[in-house]
Image: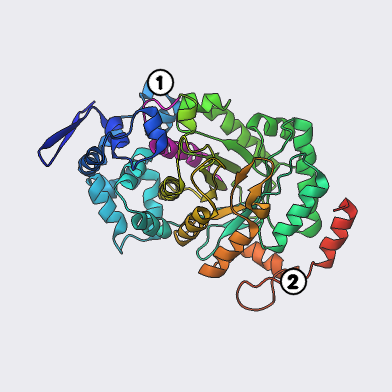
């Protein structure tokens, strides 16, 4: 391990190792203070950022933050690193890498080629010395496309996860929310439900219902019940119509163990979903959610700052070629991200790091009711992320998840972002919306006012 030092004014700041330097360089957030890894002053933070800017990128391959022998995520990062992709930037420092990313000549082609050569620690490091506008500009140049029954991540597109959660998993309540979301043009990312009853028979009932809705109306989208991966594996074994495998993941082996998972189990689940062959335009079958603070809350952060831990989770996600990845920024609570300002910075960091590493990143822009945040903060982060080229956001009825009890983005919020920035849904889904008469048959994104007759009949059968 190397010690790092920087003189700021007449004060010499010393950082014991790379892990400490990264933590001290992180913009202020409550979780790092809780963990005791944050800088003790603004001066120390600036000294750490300036010191970090001088660190060669190659150092991150030489000094693992968690020992190789102790952590399978570290082994994954090192063993799968693409040295050839890394070669164009091997000679750069972190600060020089930032300048390289911001060059006008560095376009989406160069960034796509580079992605397999970027380790999570490199992405986290450069994000720590970037302003908000830097994070937005570089992320907007990253283009990551994924496919299952439609094509996500194309330029000038914004997908929306339709999230019709219900506190009792009532079929008519879920169906009503689905129709509501579809009429706002939501649902192209996925129709994804967090079940209230997390048992296999209930999971299968919801999956079957979603499959019937998708098939009856010919919707070019995919469904997912956000249950534990072992439940999904059991559902596959029982013949359930599984499109995507969902799992929350983290950036250390120990944190993933607290979720009841490891890399081998995720590989098994991916193969099970692939064996069903349910995709029509692609075979990206995995859906991962992450969030800053998860490793810390499990006591499994190994002294790392929470944003670096979060970036390491993206190495896990990248290994399984997912259709969807999103940070649930702000969900854990103010102990980890205290207020709207910290949530906003974290959301932009997560999106930037994921996109830089080649992931199809979305974001659940949310906050708990005891955080120092409100819907104005959600509006601001939604606008910034969509400007940065976010692949998808959430569509929650009324922006209030009545099952998970947190505040997120609504169907109307997704419509706002599309109309403001001239964004369209996934192309296959857009064509379906026009065929169904949900979108007006004219240029642009304009919704009709009437409920399509086919939906009226379907709702009547469900009693909704």
Viewer-proximal residue among 207 and 8: 8
Judge whether residue 231 is colored magenta: no
Label 1 secondary element: helix
Q: Residue at 62% across / 71% down in the picture?
A: 445
The residue furthest top is: 70
User: Residue 312 in magenta?
Assistant: yes
Please state the horizontal and vertical placement of residue 254, each as a whole percent of the image: 48, 24
Q: Label 1 vs label 2: CA separation?
A: 58 Å
- Residue 407 in the image, given as x and y percentages of width and height: 59, 47
Q: Is residue 357 above or below residue 454?
A: above
Residue drawn at x 84%, y 63% as measured from the top left? 454
Q: Is residue 317 left or right of residue 287?
A: left
Q: Secondary structure at mark 2?
A: loop
Q: Which mark is residue 161?
A: none
Please state the horizontal and vertical placement of residue 109, each as a whole percent of the image.
39, 59
On the question of residue 211 being in view, the answer is: no
The range drawn in magenta is 300-323
Q: Earlier in the sequence, mark 1 or mark 2?
A: 1
Q: Which residue is mark 2?
A: 449
Residue 153 in view (yes/no):
yes
In the depicted view, which residue is nearer to us: 342 or 313?
A: 342
Mark 2 neighbour density, 10 Å: few (under 14) some (14–19) many (20 or more): few
**Which quadrant would the N terminus be assigned to in this image?**
top left
Q: Nearer the viewer, residue 438 or 334?
A: 334
Using the rendered view, name the quadrant where residue 247 is placed.
Answer: top right
**Closer mark to the observer between disc 1 and disc 2:** 2
State left or right for residue 65 relative to residue 346. left
Q: Is residue 127 above or below residue 158?
A: above
Which of the numbered marks, if any, corresponds to residue 70?
1
Residue that protrudes farthest toward the left in the picture:
10
């Amino acid at each position: 391990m190397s010690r790092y030092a920087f003189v700021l004014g007449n004060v010499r700041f010393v950082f014991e190792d790379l892990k400490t330097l990264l933590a001290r360089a992180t913009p202020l957030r409550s979780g790092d203070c809780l963990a005791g890894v944050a800088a003790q002053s603004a001066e120390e933070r600036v000294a750490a950022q300036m010191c970090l800017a001088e660190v060669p990128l190659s150092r991150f391959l030489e000094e693992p933050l968690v020992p190789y022998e102790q952590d399978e995520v570290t082994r994954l990062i090192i063993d799968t690193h693409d040295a050839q992709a890394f070669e164009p930037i091997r000679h750069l420092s972190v600060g020089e890498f930032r300048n390289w990313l911001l060059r006008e000549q560095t376009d989406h082609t160069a960034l796509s080629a580079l992605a397999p050569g970027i380790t999570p620690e490199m992405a986290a490091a450069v994000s720590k010395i970037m302003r908000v506008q830097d994070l937005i500009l570089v992320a907007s140049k990253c283009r990551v496309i994924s496919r299952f029954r439609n094509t996500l991540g194309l330029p000038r597109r914004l997908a929306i996860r339709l999230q019709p959660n219900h506190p009792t998993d009532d079929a008519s309540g879920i169906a009503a929310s689905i129709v509501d979301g579809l009429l706002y043009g939501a649902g192209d990312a996925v129709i994804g439900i967090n079940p209230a009853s997390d048992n296999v028979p209930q999971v299968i009932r919801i999956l079957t219902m979603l499959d019937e809705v998708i098939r009856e109306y010919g919707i070019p989208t995919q469904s997912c019940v956000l249950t534990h991966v072992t439940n999904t594996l059991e559902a596959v074994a029982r013949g359930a119509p599984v499109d995507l495998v969902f799992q929350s993941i983290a950036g250390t082996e120990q944190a993933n163990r607290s979720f009841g998972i490891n890399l081998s189990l995720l590989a098994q689940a991916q193969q099970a979903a692939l064996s069903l062959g349910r995709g029509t335009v692609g075979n990206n079958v995995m859906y991962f959610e992450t969030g800053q603070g998860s490793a810390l809350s499990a006591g499994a952060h190994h002294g790392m700052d929470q944003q670096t831990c979060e970036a390491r989770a993206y190495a896990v996600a990248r290994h399984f070629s997912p259709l969807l990845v999103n940070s649930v920024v702000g969900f854990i609570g103010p102990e980890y991200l205290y207020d709207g300002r910290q949530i906003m910075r974290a959301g932009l960091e997560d999106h930037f790091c994921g996109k830089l590493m080649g992931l199809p990143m979305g974001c659940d822009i949310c906050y708990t009711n005891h955080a120092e945040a409100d819907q104005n903060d959600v509006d601001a982060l939604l606008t910034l992320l969509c400007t940065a080229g976010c692949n998808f956001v959430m569509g929650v009825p009324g922006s209030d998840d009545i099952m998970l009890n947190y505040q997120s983005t609504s169907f109307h919020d997704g419509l706002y972002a599309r109309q403001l920035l001239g964004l369209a849904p996934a192309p296959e889904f857009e064509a379906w919306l026009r065929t169904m008469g949900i979108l007006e048959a004219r240029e642009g994104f304009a919704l009709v006012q009437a409920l399509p007759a086919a939906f009226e009949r379907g709702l009547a059968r469900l009693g909704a």
